[in-house]
Image (spheres, coloured by chain):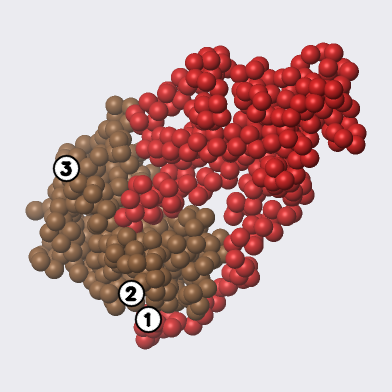
Amino acid sequence: MTLTEEPRLTGRPALPEEPAVSTHEPIWKLMLRKYMKNKLAVAGAVLLFLIIGAAIFAPWLAPKDPSQQVLLDKLAPPGKDYPLGADNLGRDTLSRLLFGARISLLVGFASVAGSIFIGTVVGAVAGYYGGKLDAVLMRFVDAVISFPSLFLLITLVTIFEPSIMTLIGIFAIFGWTGTARLVRGEFLSLRKSEFVLAARTLGIRNGRIIFSHILPNALGPIIVSATLGVGGVILGEAALSYLGLGIQPPTPSWGNMLQSAQNPQIMLGAWWYPLFPGLMILTTVLAFNFVGDGLRDAFDPKIDD
Amino acid sequence: MSTNVLEVKSLKTYFNKNKKTVRAVDGVDFSIRKGETVALVGESGCGKSMTSLSIMGLVPAPAGKIVDGEILLNGTDLVGLPEKKMYEVRGREVAMIFQEPMTSLNPVLTIGDQLSGVVMHHLKLNKKEALKKSTEMLEIVGFADPEKTLKDYPHRLSGGMRQRVMIAMAMSCNPKLLIADEPTTALDVTIQAQVLELMKDLSQKFSTSILLITHDLGVVSELAERVIVMYSGQIVEIADSNRLFNDPLHPYTEGLIGSVPSIDGDIRRLEAIPGNVPAPGTEMPGCRFAPRCSRATSKCTEGVPEMRVLPDGRSVRCVLYEEGAAQ
C-alpha cells in the first residue's frame, strides 16, 4: 500500500484520466455520420435506393406490360408513347428496364450472398487454423480459380436449363474464391493479434473467436468485396445474357435487352435501344462501388472522424 | 502441500524450428500458494512468457510443445488435458492479463460485449445477469460510470482504463490464479501504481494467487511475496522478496539488482551485466550464466549445477552454494 492505506474496493473515485472523446452517441449514428461525409457514397446510396425502389414497385411504375409487343411501333424513338423508346419487337423499353432491374438485382444479391457465405467460412477456417487445413483449402481455392470459368459457365448453363436459380447457383459457386482469399488474409494477421490471445486465455471457444471476435474485425473488407461482387455479378449476368445463355426471353433482364440490340443496324440506327440498358448496368455497378467504399469507412472504428 | 494452488514440476517446453530444438522452458519447478503473489523475473527471452503460456495450454502449436513435466492446478494435471476441458480452465480457474492493454481488447466489440461474453460462457448466466455482473466488475476495478463504459468501444478508453477492463475480465469468474504478463510495462508511472494497487486489493479480496511476470524489479518489490528468477529457460533462484533484494544469492540475481538505480542508496554507477542472454537454442555445458558471470570458475562449465535448497528455505542454482563449496 504505497498510495493509500486502506483498501477501497468499491466506489473508487472517478479516474483522473478521462477518454479523449466523451460523447456517447450510439454506434450507428457515428457510422452514419462517417458515411455521410463521403459524398460519392451518399450519391451511390441514393441511386441504389432509387433503383431498388424502382425494381420493387416495377408493376406499378411501368407504363406498359413489358412483354406486350406492338410490332408497328418497333424501334420507336423516345417520345410521348415510349419514354425511352421501344425495342425491335415493339416492347416498351422503360417497362422492360423496370422489370429487368428486378431480375438483375435478384441475381446479383442472391448469388453474392451465397458466395460471401461460402468464401467467409472457408477463408475464416483456413486463416484461423492455418497449417495443413489452410494448405488444403487454399489449394482447392486455387483449383477453382484455375477453372476457365466462362467456358464452364457456358457448359453448365447448357446442361442445366438457364433459369434464375441456376444462374444464382453458378455465380455463387464461382464467385466465392476471391472472398475466401481476402478473408483468409485478414484472419492470418488477426489471429496473431493480442486480443485473440487474450480471448483464448479467457476460455472462449475457437468457433466463437472466429465468428464473434475476428469476423467483425474483417467485416470492412468483406462488405467492400460484397458490394463490388454484386456489381460484378450484374455484369456477369449481362455478359451471359448477351451471349444468349443467361435469363431467357421474354423475361427481361438488362443483359438480354442488350442481346437483342447486337445487330449493328439497330445499334447505329436506334441508339436509344442499347443505350438505356447499358446505362442502367453502368450506373448500378458504379453505385454499388461507391456504396462499398462508403461502408468500409463507416464500419472501420479505427478511422475516426 | 494442499494449499498450493499451482505446482509446476520439471516443466519442459521445447520449440522445433528447422530441425533445431529450442529449449524455451527447460525443467522448471515452482509452486504458488493460495493467495500468494509470486513474481517471475528475468531478461527478455529467458522463458518467462513461455512458462505462462504453458500453464494456459496455449503454447503456439505445432512448433512449440510441452515435452515433459506436470502443471498441477489444485491437484489436476493440466498437461495433456483435452482441449475441451482446457476451455473450462481458461478464464475460470486461471486467467491472464497482458502487457499491451491497447491491443488486448477487441477493437470492434464494446466493453460490455467482451466482458459479458466471458461471464456468460463460464458462469452460465443469461444476457441480463451477465450485464449486471459486468457492471459490478467494472465498479470494482474503479469505473465511475460502469453502465456508460459497458457501451464504449476500447478506442475511447485510455491505456490504464483498458488495463482495468482487462483485469475486470480476468477476475470476473473469480479465478484461482491470475497470470499477469508485464501488466504495467506499457503504462504511465502514475497509472502503474494505480493498477498495481488494484491488483493487490483484488488478490486480497478474492484470495487469488498471482503469477507476476515482469522484468521490472520495482513492480516486484511492490507486489510480490516471493520471487523466482529465471535465466535462459531455467530457474536460478527462488527466495522471499525481501531476502532476495537484501541478500541475493545467485550472481545473476545480484547483477539484476545491481542494474537498477536505487533512490535511497548512494549515487553510484549502475552495473550492467556484461554480455547478452544466450540466443535461444544455444547449447552449452554447465551453468548457462557462466560466460557472463564475474565469479565463474572452471567448475561452472563442468556440468549444469543442481537446484539446491538452503536451510533457510531459499533455493539457488549455482556451484557457489553446492555442498562443500566455501561460502
Q: Is residue A153 above or below residue A31?
A: above
**Residue shown at 65%/28% (left/top)?**
A251
**Residue shown at 77%/47% (left/top)?**
A43
Residue B171 in view, yes or no: no
Residue at the far bottom: name it.
A6
The chain displayed brown equals B
Q: Label for residue B303? A: none
Tag 2 and tag 1, C-beta contact below 8 Å:
yes
Image position of B170 (left or right of B146): left
Q: Which residue is mark 2?
A: B202
Q: Position of residue B129 (x, y in %)?
A: 36, 72
Of circles 2 and 3, the one toward us is: 2
Q: Is residue B88 above or below residue A79?
A: below
Q: Nearer the viewer, residue A111 or A33?
A: A111
Q: Amino acid at mark 1?
A: Leu
In the rendered picture, chain A carries what hue?
Answer: red
- Gap in angstroms between the C-alphas marked 2 and 3: 33 Å
Q: Which residue is mark 3?
A: B68
Circle 2 — which element? helix
Q: Position of residue A1 (x, y in %)?
A: 37, 80
The answer to which quarter of the image holds residue B3 is: bottom left
Q: Position of residue B180 (x, y in %)?
A: 35, 61
Q: Label for residue A9? A: 1
The answer to which quarter of the image holds residue A226 is: top right
Circle 3 — which element? strand
Q: Amino acid at mark 2?
A: Leu
